[in-house]
Each structure stands twice: as C-alpha cells, then as structure tokens.
Amino acid sequence: MTLLLTLLIAGVSLLLAEVFLPGMVAGVLGVVCLLGAAVVGFAEFGAKTGSLILMAELFAGTILTILWMRYFPKTPFGKKYILDPSTAAHASKDSEKWLGHEGQALTDLRPAGAARLHGEKVDVITTGDHLESGTRVKVVRVDGPSIFVRRA
C-alpha cells in the first residue's frame, strides 16, 4: 500500500513539476509513476482494484487536462508563457507595411540579419543569396512576422 501511494503522489508531483521544468522529463517520469501505481494495484490487490486505480487515473487525467487547457491560459502565470493570438496578428500586419520598400543591410545577411528600412532597424531574411553588410536590399515578400529581401 505504501508503494502504491508513493507512486501516485510522485506521479502527480512530477506532472505538476513539468510546468516549471523544461524538457518533458518530469512529465514522462510522472506518467511512468502513475502507470507503475496501476501495475502495483494489479499485483498487490488483484484485477478489480488495479482496474479501478487505472480507470480513476485515466478519468482524473482527462478531467484535469480539460480544466488545465481551459483555465491555465487565463492565469497570470499562463499569460507569461502563451502567445496571445492578437499579438501575432498585429506583428504580421506591422510587417506588411515594408513590402516593396528598399533599404540597406546593417549586418551580413546569411540568410538572416538586420536591415535599415526608412530609418528603422528590422530583422530580415534573404531569399537565398548571402548579402554583405551595406548592400542595398528590397523587400520582396512578407510571411507573417518574417520579412524577405533580395539585392536591390
């Protein structure tokens, strides 16, 4: 019984720790602990208890995942880590104003770098060629926040 409870507590704790720790290691270990708890339930208490533990884990996991997906993005912590869709749309609209404009490469573009367009420093990507710093460039395409240039 002690092993079963230890695995359940460790599994839930590791899944919660996954929020703060990068790399999915804690999450995978948490799932392994929860599956191990179900196996211990089958081995020590029989098929009926093991099945109940497994079903309870699956049910609780499903409900908690749904609640997490619904409410986490609205929390202050969630807002720090999730990009607001309106921000991404605003960034792509701002980038489209550069289409057709000419400027000068501020850095070597291999293929990404910076260029000055109408007095503003802008991150750009070449359409394939390596361009030296100081080269005149022209914006030929805007794809979301990405601004593509070629030699003017």
Image (spheres, helix red, strand yellow):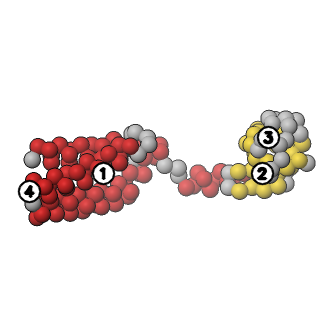
Which residue position is annotated with label 4?
A: 45
Q: Tell us which disc is closer to us: 2 or 3.
A: 3
What percent of the width, then of the height, locates residue 8?
A: 20, 48
Q: Is 151 situated above or below 42?
A: above
Mark 2–mark 3 CB contact (< 8 Å): no
Q: Is 77 situated above or below 90?
A: above
Q: Tell us which disc is closer to us: 4 or 1.
A: 4
Q: Is residue 33 visible?
A: yes
Q: Which mark is residue 148?
A: 2
Which residue position is annotated with label 1?
A: 31
**Is disc 1 surrounded by few (<14), some (14 to 19) or many (20+) residues within 10 Å?**
some
What percent of the width, then of the height, locates residue 146?
A: 71, 51
Relative to residue 44, is residue 15 drawn left or right? Answer: right
Which badge, 2 or 3, comes first in the chain's sequence?
3
Secondary structure at numbered mark 2? strand
**Residue displayed at 35% across by 43% down:** 26
**Is disc 3 surrounded by few (<14), some (14 to 19) or many (20+) residues within 10 Å?**
many
Which badge, 3 or 1, comes first in the chain's sequence?
1
Q: Amino acid at mark 1?
A: Val
Mark 3–mark 4 CB contact (< 8 Å): no
Alpha carbon separation for disc pair 3 and 1:
45 Å
Which badge, 4 or 2, comes first in the chain's sequence?
4
Secondary structure at numbered mark 3? loop
Alpha carbon separation for disc pair 1 and 2:
43 Å
Mark 4–mark 1 CB contact (< 8 Å): no
Q: Tell us which disc is closer to us: 1 or 2.
A: 1
Relative to residue 103, is residue 35 drawn left or right? Answer: left
Q: Amino acid at mark 3?
A: Leu
Secondary structure at numbered mark 4? helix
